[in-house]
Image (cartoon, helix red, strand yellow):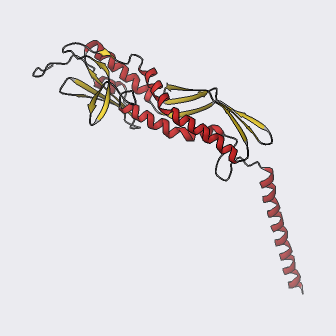
Amino acid sequence: MIEKRMKRGQVTIFIIVAILIVGLVALIFFIIPKTKTETGFDVQNPRAFIQNCMEDTVAEVVDIISSKGGSVVPEFYFMYNGERVEYLCYTNEYYKTCVVQQPMLKQHIESEIKTAIEGDVETCFTNLEESYRIEGYTAELQRGATEVELLPKRVVVNFAGYVLAVTKADTARHEAFSVVLNNNLYELISIANSIIDWEATYGEAETTAYMTYYKDLKVEKHTQQDGTKVYIISDRDTGSKFQFASRSVAWPPGFAS
């Protein structure tokens, strides 16, 4: 009899514990607000949506521009290993120093990135609006301007004037959208500008001097038959690079410099 009562008591305890657990789970479910939908979209963080949507596109465009000397489609270039590499300093004469072709290289690259990503910007913001509508929100997007800036150790894309208003029970406004890409293109083109200055002034740049001062960089110079030099500046740690062409103080065929 005592044993049966003990068993009944254990069953009762188990039932009470089970009810408490179910109640606790339900309490957590209803009290803690859900921010992510079943699709993984975080309705509280649309900035993360834009960062994730645009990051790969920005990285791809930066890589293309870096491998071609600063332009997505170079118009004035040297073919090197089957790829167009833009002349950033050039003269078609012998013995003469070159003329700088992109005196505002940083601004030119920023403009090239902006132009190349415009289509994806429109697509990502349209998809953001649609993601809210799928979740039952009313979404209204005020479009603004895309601004690209090369900064130390990063590439920043700001969407100035973009404001997203979403309404369900309440209305929330989201702005200050941006994309940040960890990339040292800013540093690489700073070295490129220094090399271009040497090319335009003296017709030559000493690459070992840069590597002595910047231990994390590798700076190569590949001289071609027509006197063109292809400079390749690469980061030993990340593998990122920037390459460009220059023709300065070239010698006629048969003459040695």
- The answer to whether residue 109 is left or right of residue 168 is left
Q: Nearer the viewer, residue 240 or 157?
A: 157
The residue sitting at 89% across, 84% down in the picture is 2
Q: Quadrant of residue 169?
A: top right
Q: Nearer the viewer, residue 42 or 16?
A: 42
User: Going by the picture, which residue comes out furthest to the left?
Assistant: 254
User: Going by the picture, which residue comes out furthest to the bottom?
Assistant: 1
Q: Quadrant of residue 16?
A: bottom right
- The answer to whether residue 90 is left or right of residue 64 is left
Point out residue 178 in the picture as x, y percentages from the top left corner.
59, 32
The residue sitting at 46% across, 33% down in the picture is 183
The residue sitting at 40% across, 22% down in the picture is 190
Point out residue 191 in the picture as x, y percentages from the top left corner.
37, 23
- The answer to whether residue 220 is left or right of residue 48 is left
Above or below, 247 against 174 in this view is above
Numbered disc total:
0
- The answer to whether residue 67 is left or right of residue 157 is left
Above or below, 48 against 158 in this view is below
* Location of the C terminus (image quadrant): top left
Point out residue 42 in the picture as x, y percentages from the top left corner.
67, 45
Q: Nearer the viewer, residue 184 or 93?
A: 93
* Location of the N terminus (image quadrant): bottom right
Point out residue 128 in the picture as x, y percentages from the top left corner.
63, 41
